[in-house]
Amino acid sequence: MVDFLLWIGLYNLLGSLVLFTMHNEHVADWVMRRGTEAVAVPYEHGPFGRLWLWWAATANTFMGAVMVLATRWPTVVQREVCVAVIALYGVMYVVCAIGGRRRPPWGRGALSIHVLRPSQMAWGLWALSS
């Protein structure tokens, strides 16, 4: 469980850095269209894009920090954090699946969500059972 919390926490901290850099539209376009092929058209922030990025980046920073710090906490608390992470990834998966039906036109990279989130949840469940 410690390995799961450490690595998934570091993953979230790295993700928050990427989200913070995506406030620059050129970086965001590269990440969303060229790097991950999540969108099929040139990416623009839109009216609330930067607000969403701030929220997502700060939430990822907080989550990642809690997960990394939880590696030093008692096992009972680690289990609670692990359960919360699994539940949060489940909610994120459902929201992305529903939100994915809206614009912009999604590219083939957006399909990775169907591998990424279930894999993260499965790893968390495995970590809980060991």
Image (cartoon, rainbow, N blue to C red):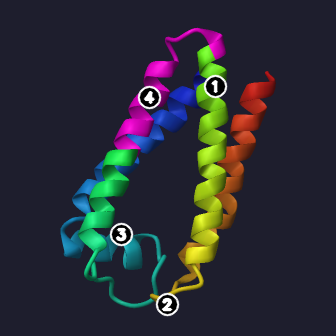
Given the image, on which type of amino acid does mark 1 rest?
Glu
The mark lying in front, picked from 2 and 3, is 2
Residue 77, by quadrant, is top right
Whether residue 1 appears in this view of the structure is no
Q: Which mark is residue 105?
A: 2
Q: Between residues 102 and 22, which one lies in front from this camera angle?
A: 102
Q: Which mark is residue 31?
A: 3
Q: What secondary structure characterizes most of the magenta part?
A: helix
The mark lying in front, picked from 2 and 4, is 4
Quarter containing the C terminus: top right
**Which percent across, then down, holds residue 41?**
39, 91
Q: CA distance from mark 1 to mark 3?
A: 33 Å
Q: CA distance from mark 4 to mark 1?
A: 12 Å
Q: Which mark is residue 80?
A: 1
Secondary structure of residue under mark 2: loop
Q: Are marks 2 and 4 in contact (CB under 8 Å)?
A: no
Q: CA distance from mark 4 to mark 3?
A: 26 Å
Q: Between residues 27 and 80, which one lies in front from this camera angle?
A: 80
In terms of sequence position, does the residue under pointer 4 or pointer 3 come before the other? Answer: 3
Given the image, on which type of amino acid does mark 4 rest?
Val
